[in-house]
Image (tube, rainbow, N blue to C red):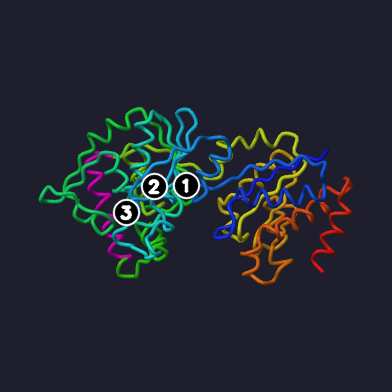
Amino acid sequence: MARVLIASDKFKGSLTAVQVGAAVRAGIRRARPDAEVSVVPVADGGDGTVAAALAAGFDAVPLTASGPTGEPVLTAYARREDLAVVEMADVSGLVRLPDGLLRPMTATSRGTGEVIAAAVAAGCRRIVLGIGGSAGTDGGAGLLEALGARLLDADGQPIGDGGAALTRVHSIDLTALRELMDGVEVIVACDVDNPLTGPHGAAAVYGPQKGADPAQVAELDAALGQWAQRLAAELGADRRAGTFDELAGSGAAGGVGFAALAVLGATLRPGIELMLELVGFEAQLAGADLVITGEGKLDEQTLHGKAPAGVAAAARAAGVPVVAVCGRNTLPEDRLRDTGFAAAYSLIEIEPDEQRCLSAGAMLLQQLGVRIAYEHLAGGPGVAAAVADQAGGDS
């Protein structure tokens, strides 16, 4: 009996990781009714991180927190015993901006801090924080305030929200934050190595994606630099080589990586590596004959810390062949092979209409599942009938 493990990320804007897995599984089962097919949704620390944890057996803990513009949003973290998985994208992310209007100067990370605070108050002592997809560039100031930090201006008033407000920081009091977070381990799922400031920093690289024009990028970069200096004065000399704002990953999520490193003593780890551990991927691999992974688009970015590359690396290390499904693939065959993929199957290959790929993605993925079974699990009962049935249905 063939055993197939499907570990795909979402197809952004179209299908969740769970839906991708279900569709491919249906196709595999059409071709090989005897196959044992398991679905383990994965994510790389961005949107879909909590969903992947829930699919792996974590419990959902719903709550209301502040969105990136301060409005309340309904979100959730995932919990298993004393471990909480928090997804920044779902509370402080671009997807949470009202009407999709970008707010590069005022968007805050406060809601993410509120979720962490709620998890800690509920007894969680380990926090896994996925920080992809953030809407703001506030250096993590909002997150720290939600955890008890007091950031005051020269008049003793709160500085306000967003990166532009960082220039007003006059005094910092971390007393309450330290009491709350005492004994709490924070691990950040992070796939970028940008420093906080400079030409490769949070504002310069990611600010434009969040709506900042060149003048605003320069303003945000300067504000982040002032914030780093103020915080360094409060913390005293860094206890590591270099400064926190120079450390790889400090520029992640608009500087939330910086706040996590400098104040929370966080550890930064590659997102997909961390998520594969959380969902028990290595144990799931045992006995698998084929792994299927994927995401909406396979391209050069995929090879730099994205979920499919991480899954392929783990499968390759275990000696299990792996193929990918996607909406579109721009990677040449030699790049796919070098990364460990035996093949890649894209929706656009069987349906050139991109809008139909979006609207009928699940049905098309079923067709790819049949094809994968035929090409990689050939010989089982039902293959010929399933392929003939598909051919007839597509005519």
Pick whichever of labels 3 and 1 is earlier in the sequence: 3
Q: Which residue extends farthest left?
A: 155
Q: How many marks?
A: 3
Nearest to the eye among marks 2 and 3: give it: 3
Pick whichever of labels 2 and 3 is earlier in the sequence: 3
Nearest to the eye among marks 3 and 1: give it: 3
For residue 210, what is the image quadrant?
bottom left
Residue depicted at 38% across the width and 59% down the height: 97
For residue 335, what is the image quadrant?
bottom right
Q: Which residue extends farthest bottom?
A: 353
Pick whichever of labels 2 and 1 is earlier in the sequence: 1
How far apart marks 2 and 1 lie (CA) works out to 8 Å
Residue depicted at 62% across the width and 70% down the height: 355
**Pointer 3 residue:** 71
**Pointer 2 residue:** 257
Provide the residue span drawn in magenta: 217-237
Question: From the image, which quarter does the C terminus lie in?
Answer: bottom right
235 inside magenta stretch? yes
Q: Which residue type does callout 3 highlight?
A: Glu
Horizontal arrangement in the rendering, residue 233 relative to residue 364 (left or right): left
**Pointer 1 residue:** 190
